[in-house]
Amino acid sequence: MKFIARFLYVPLAGLLVLTSCAKDETESYDKFENQALEAWMTQHRSDLVENLQSEGLYYVDLLDAGDLASDPINTEDIWVSFDFSGRDLSGNIILTRNADDAVLAGSFSKYTHYVPFYRYCGSENSGLMEGTWLAMRRTLTLGDTYFRNNKDRLGITSPEVTLRYGSKIRLYMPSSVVGNGVEGTGGYEGQEGYSLSSKRPFIVTMEIRDTVSNPLEREGTDVDDFCELNGGLQIYSKGDDDTPATEVPEDPEDPEHPYNETSKRWVSACDSIPQVYVNVRYNPAEPRDQLSFPAPYHVGYEPYVSEASVRDIDMQIAEALKKRFHGEGDDYQKYEGVKALEADSVTLDGTAKIWYIGRFLDGFIFDTNIDEVKKIIYGEVAQKGTALDYTPSSGGMIQAFYYTIPNLKFGQWAELITTSTNAYGSSGKSGSSSSSTSGSSGYSSSYLDYLNYLNYANSYYGSGGYYGGYYGGYYGNYYGGYYDSMYGYGYDSSSTGTTVTTITTEIPSFTPLIFQLYIEPEDLSLIHISEPTRH
């Protein structure tokens, strides 16, 4: 979401007078708007008039009290995952994280990952829309009549309510707790041509889907569990005074070497970097190497229709990769595995030409440069893919690539999984939308949206922050400048006349990533890369 801000520069001599006038004007408008919103509520939602909150002057409709056995959000500084849809007073959808609402609004995109917002919600508001922050951090007071009429439905015993896991509310907010306008982007747009202008009330429906005390710990657990589910995990470390070193066997013939059929599919990419793991025996043509996702992404629409869709997609991708890179029929050249490759490793100074598929832990594909995969996922190949040139010593990619690619061979398939520590970190990447004719219709991927909390996260988790001592040493230079990566190419997703809209997929904060990789042989005569069939 984008907030629209305007700035005015004036001579210092007139500043006090202007400030006073502006304050009076603002107060006058806020009073008028609050009266107008009250009149609208009286006409349309008279049952909620008594649910006016004294702080923020917004109205609350409690749709679901949530899991009353769980702790309220406001008991600690916490990270919150929440669904979010916003409308104006006319009912027009302005912004939504919900695929059904996006379809209804005509803004659904196959490039968009329809999942809840994942944001920091602390005792001080560091970027959340004011009204949503107040609702999550303050005790909500329900009117007597509303409470009596709804207490049995909600399972509550007091008109004083705090939000927690499972809570669902609808807020009717004046602009004073909304901001200077709202505009969706990155596939989260609402109805075409509709945005929320400044000084306008906003109706928001939100549901608390998850709460996380420590996002670093959570994603680390998710990655380790994913690896254990998908073939097992072998962690290598240098050891310390308390634990012995677990080193990678140097001899490729050692039965415990990652090249061999050990009991562990995933191994540490580097013995000094935690939670960057690689599967060097990956072969897309082998059914055993198909990934299993604990909670497969599905929204009821192509290509992710149901939970089974991800497995069906992977089967199609496996066949497409085999044909693309190894031929078919008489031209088929079987991939014999990394151990059989008579090829050098890329090393730090070598240049790898990489074909990749980037995924989340739910199976959603956020980026690829392989045309056949684009066709399967997006239904189109709007922009022809080319191999990604990467020289590790030159940088330019996520740090996980730096720790992984040098040890891979030319002509090798591999899988990589990493926590956000060595990917896109706490800031993630904002989804964006742009038009070839009218310019950007949203904000660029470098623009931190209204819910971004990186400034607070740095102080909280950074080198001098609350968790700095532990995580600074364990996770390394977490907030370093290594997030200029391969992400963000985008694809042309729709065309109307001469107007082409390009959408790039959002990478949420603290999000682990999976990459399925193929590195071209140095000698291209040893590879069969067929031209994709055009549709």
Image (cartoon, rainbow, N blue to C red):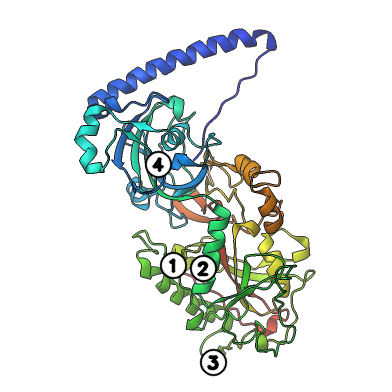
Give the amino acid type for the residue marked by disc 4 in the picture.
Answer: Glu
Q: Residues within 10 Å of mark 3 (few under 14, many from 20)?
A: few
Dot 3 or dot 4, earlier in sequence: 4
Tell me which numbered mark, 4 or 2, is placed earlier along the sequence: 4
Q: Tell me if I can see residue 533 in this picture.
A: no
Q: Amino acid at mark 3?
A: Asp
Q: Is residue 409 visible?
A: yes
Q: Give the residue at x 42% y 69%.
A: 310
Q: In the drawing, does residue 321 fall left or right of residue 54?
A: right
Which quadrant of the rendered structure holds the C terminus? bottom left
Q: Residue 471 at x, y = what percent?
A: 66, 54
Q: Secondary structure at mark 3?
A: helix
Amino acid type of the residue tagged 1 in the rendering: Pro
- Circle 1 or circle 2, nearest the eye: 2
At 52% from the left edge and 54% from the top edge, which residue is drawn? Answer: 505
Res. 294 mark: 1
* Local secondary structure at mark 1: loop
Above or below — where is 373 with respect to 257? above
Please tell me whether mark 2 sits on a helix, a strand or a loop. Answer: helix
> Quick check: 42 above or below 259?
above
Q: Which mark is residue 192?
A: 4
Asked if the residues shown at circle 1 and circle 3 are in contact, with their CB atoms under 8 angstroms apart, the answer is: no
Q: Which residue is mark 2?
A: 225
- Counting residues from the start of the chain, the first of labels 3 and 2 encountered is 2
